[in-house]
Amino acid sequence: MRDIALIPKGGDTLFTTDSVDAEISLWTIFKGRVVFSDLKIANAFLTARKTKDQNNFSFLLRKKTPAAPRDTTQGRNYGEILNRLIETAFENVPDAVTFRNLLVTYESQNRNIRVNMPLLTIDDGDISSSLTVQTDSLINKLHVDGSINPDDYQLSANLYTTDTAGIRIPYIKEKYGAKLSFDSLKVSLTDKVYKRDRLTIKGEGQMNKLLVNHPKVADGDVEIDKGAIDYVVTIGENYYSLDTLSRVTVNKMVVYPQARLITKPSKRVALKVHSAQTEANDFFQSLPKGMFETLEGIKAKGYLTYKMNFYVDLAQIDSLKFDSDLEGKNFNVLEYGNTDLGRMNQPFEHTVYEYGKPLRTFIVGPQNPNFTPYNQISNYLKNSILTSEDYGFFKHKGFHEGAFRHSMITNLKEKNFTRGGSTISMQLVKNVFLTRKKTVARKVEEMLIVWLIENNRITSKQRMYEVYLNIIEWGPNVYGVKEASRFFFEKYPAELNLAESLFLTSIIPKPKAYRYSFDAYGNLRNRSRYFFKLISGIMLRRGLISREEYDNLYPHVNLAGRARDLIVTATPAPDTTAVDSLQIDLVTPIDLLD
């Protein structure tokens, strides 16, 4: 066929080609369908245009008659659908294909896409092509090679570029505020089995020089030199799984993931991850660059293994299960990376950041007149903070799985991140070693640093708690226990009584909002009074205070100094709120969350 054109009535030309040469496989006609054995197309131009009022391609989209209502209680079997698509695609692959000079363009008010493919060939199963893809101002020059075996449903393809900027994914920046690129991509389908209404496919994938940039992931670029996956995926009616034979490689680290999603009668999610025993230096060198800047350059000996298990039925969220563990074998840190993880063992300089900018710098040690040693701080305050924030601090190794589990349950119920599960160790690491930015990288780095400090006993528990009490925020430009004692009560930390200690403990989550703990008459609001009763009751049961001290406790404090002046200057409204369940949950000590 020569000089073919497809022109919609009253519209712009959609498609033209100089020539189409086709040979039809005779045996396929007897099977009731037509498959080309050889297909050649030269100088083909597909130009799709869309304006505000019309386009030149919608006539191809036939109007379908309304389908009969689907039984939504059964759900769709996407395994069956995908199996049909795979079989149809493979069974219609010609033995030989030659496309020369193919140009595809799409033009609209918002998008301009241009794909120029000088040559595409399929010869005896071997695929080869080069193309240039331009999306608006972004240009990718790509090379594709691979192979296809229609009889066994096998396919492999390699996508790569010679551009030093890599292959950049368009519209990610515009839609998600992110940047995503990679140097090369290899994908394959090696096996397909459809049995008992479920499709299982096996294959491999590999991506080199992956770069991700998003403000919620990390402050800058996150890079993975080499990532690969051997996948075994099963899809059925209301069922999706990444099976046990799957394997993920990140640089030098190998991880075995298992995942399962069941959508009916209720949505259930299960995820298991365990890594192979990895040499310590290989483990740290495999961490994505840009996510663990504090640890970059760290050297260690021994081996590390990670395990994680997660399960939730969204119809019964309270049944959520979660456990996570990083195990070390003969593990020891030989050399710290960019940051000295032992800095808390000596006096050190601490900088406070607010909204990403340095606010104040001071020495945490005897050189600072506001520094207060551990044994000069009221036991009431030390015990009330431990009771409220993390009573198991001196026993655990930095993590409280029950608290983390409970925070996940709360966040799933609220469909938002409303609660964390941070221990004192995690709060301390966040303040001393990391920025306050809420990124995935910072949270994961925080957890890894906590594990290193706690499991290697880099800093003693008492010293960690001493540093914590001397650096945490307690009000507007008020940092550390001595400044807090002077600001609120004009006392020294050793002189604080039980009520004053409970008040200072109650404002730790939101220290700048301390004024809203009081009503217009200077009395503590309901939430603060509830906090006093809850924490003091727990302290009594644990033997941290006597019955007499508990009975004589009245939920009231007499502010002095600057704090009182600020309360008088900006008197809060009268207390008209009740203590609701959410307020109670927000002050529940993490040791009681289970």
Image (cartoon, rainbow, N blue to C red):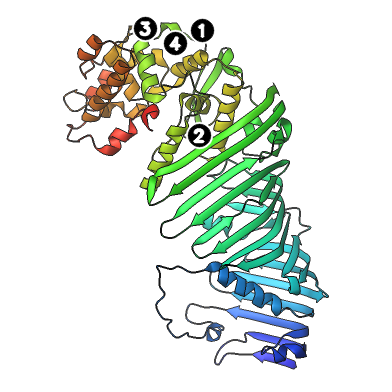
**Which residue corresponds to mark 4?**
370
Residue 97 in percent (x, y) is at: 78, 79
Q: Which of the two marks, 2 or 1, is nearer to us in this view?
A: 1
**Picture disc at residue 494:** 3
Instruction: Give the distance between the C-alpha atoms of the residues marked 4 and 2, in whole angstroms.
Output: 25 Å
At 71% from the left and 70% from the top, the residue drawn is: 153
Q: Are marks 2 and 1 in contact (CB under 8 Å)?
A: no
Answer few, some or many: residues within 10 Å of disc 1's Cα (few below 14, many 20 plus, some between 14 and 19). Answer: few
Instruction: Give the distance between the C-alpha atoms of the residues marked 1 and 4, in whole angstroms.
Output: 8 Å
At 76% from the left and 59% from the top, the residue drawn is: 161
Q: Could you tell me which secondary element the residue under label 2 belongs to? A: loop
Q: Are marks 1 and 4 in contact (CB under 8 Å)?
A: no
Report the front residue among 330 and 249.
Answer: 330
Q: Is residue 569 left or right of residue 415?
A: left
**Which residue corresponds to mark 1?**
366
Q: Could you tell me which secondary element the residue under label 4 belongs to? A: loop
Instruction: Give the distance between the C-alpha atoms of the residues marked 3 and 4, in whole angstroms.
Output: 13 Å
Residue 254 in percent (x, y) is at: 69, 43
From the viewer's perspective, is residue 5 above or below residue 289? below
Q: Could you tell me which secondary element the residue under label 3 belongs to? A: helix
Q: Earlier in the sequence, mark 3 or mark 4?
A: 4
The type of residue carrying mark 4 is: Asn
**Picture disc at residue 164:** none
At 24% from the left and 27% from the top, the residue drawn is: 530
